[in-house]
Structure formats: structure tokens, C-alpha cells
Amino acid sequence: MARPRIITVLRYDVPVPRPKTHDEALRGRLLERAGELLSTEGPGALSLRRLAADVNTSTTAVYSLFGGKPALLNAVYEEAFRRFGERIASVPQTDDPVEDLVQIGLAYRASALADPQFYLVMFSKVVPNFEPSEETKEAANQTFLPVVRDVGRAVECGVFTPEPPERIALAMWGMVHGLVSLELNGNLPPGVEIASVYERALRAHADGWRNA
């Protein structure tokens, strides 16, 4: 019995998709490294050529993904506040606004420790004379709103003293920013275990605003 013949038909009219080399994974690595260079060595260290070499890609890829250095800088700010905002927003809202504020403070520190390369970028003029886009500025402003919201809830229900919520929220924001900055910059006194001190400071600060 004769074996059936197998005929292979080659088609040349079907396009084969090229592998994506300039993808979101590469974009993320470039932003991470750009944040590291800015926060550890300053803006003079961030050249597109060095960034590409550090991430093992080409300057063409950087231009393809960002279009140039100003857009890259804005993307770094945008990514920093996106991650930070997501962690703050992920804190669940409960019936206890004061505890919610403490948890937001803990999320603030957790975000800074998870992405230290972005912390200095977010909260200092690490690149002189650079102005992020209006959209990025708005994203930055949004990260403060959960604190104002929960302070307002605490004031409304009589737990906090009747002060403008923005004033109390700013005091809390400044306190956590100071402690986190000391920790990330290595300026803590030797032998101090910061995690427990940090949470106690959060709770003590919140108690200081309670309505006597």
C-alpha cells in the first residue's frame, strides 16, 4: 500500500510579526535606572547614552519609547507618583478614620522603601528648572487627598479638634516625610530601630489632634 504524499505549502504573503523589543518591560527598566541615576548621582549623570548602556539597550530604544530627555524626565516623575499613589490609595477605608490615617502613614514608608530610587525624585528639585507636565503635577497632588479626606472624616465625627483638615493633614504629611527622609538618607541615630518608632510616632501625632 502506497504511503500518502505530504505536500508542504510555503506561503510568503502572511506577514510574520517582529518581536517587540521596545516594550513595557524595557520602558520600566529604563525608568528604574533613570530614577537611580537621578537620586544617587544627580541630573548630570543622566545622559541617554549612559542610560541605554546601563540597561543594555540602544539610544534608539530610548528615543523610541520617550522621544527625548525632557519626556523621559517627565515619565520618571509620572511613574514615581503613579506607584506612590497606588500604594496610598490601596489602604482600605474603614469606620475608624484615625486608624486609616496611621495605615496611610505606614503605606507611605512602605512605598519609599520599595522604590527609594523614586523618593528623592518625587520630593525634591533633583533636576533644577525642570517642570513636570500639568498631568504629572495633578497626579502628585492626588496622593495627598486621602490624608485630607480621612482627617476631614475625623474632624466631622468629633474625634479630631475642629481645625481645617488641610492643616492637620499637612502636619502629618510633614512628620512622616521627615522620618522617612532620615531613614533613606542614612541619617538615623545608630542603634535606633525605626519601624516601631515610626508607627508609635504616627499614633502619637494622631492622638495629639484628638478633641479633648
Image (spheres, helix red, strand yellow):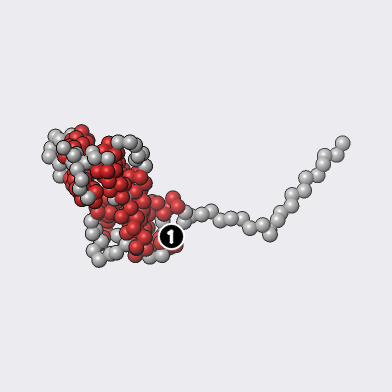
Residue 65 position in % (x across, y down): 43, 60
Residue 101 visible in the shown view: no
Where residue 113 sits, quadrant-wise, is top left
Amino acid at pointer 1: Leu
Q: Quadrant of the C terminus?
A: top left
Q: Is residue 191 left or right of residue 47?
A: left
Residue 182 visible in the shown view: yes
The residue singled out by tag 1 in the image is 65
Q: Secondary structure at mark 1?
A: helix
Residue at point 19%, 35% (across, down) = 200
Between 56 and 123, the one lying in front of the other is 123
Where residue 38 sits, quadrant-wise, is bottom left
Residue 100 position in % (x across, y down): 29, 39
Q: Is residue 209 left or right of residue 12?
A: left
Residue 184 position in % (x across, y down): 22, 45
Residue at point 19%, 39% (across, down) = 210
Between 181 and 10, the one lying in front of the other is 181
Residue at point 35%, 39% (across, down) = 93
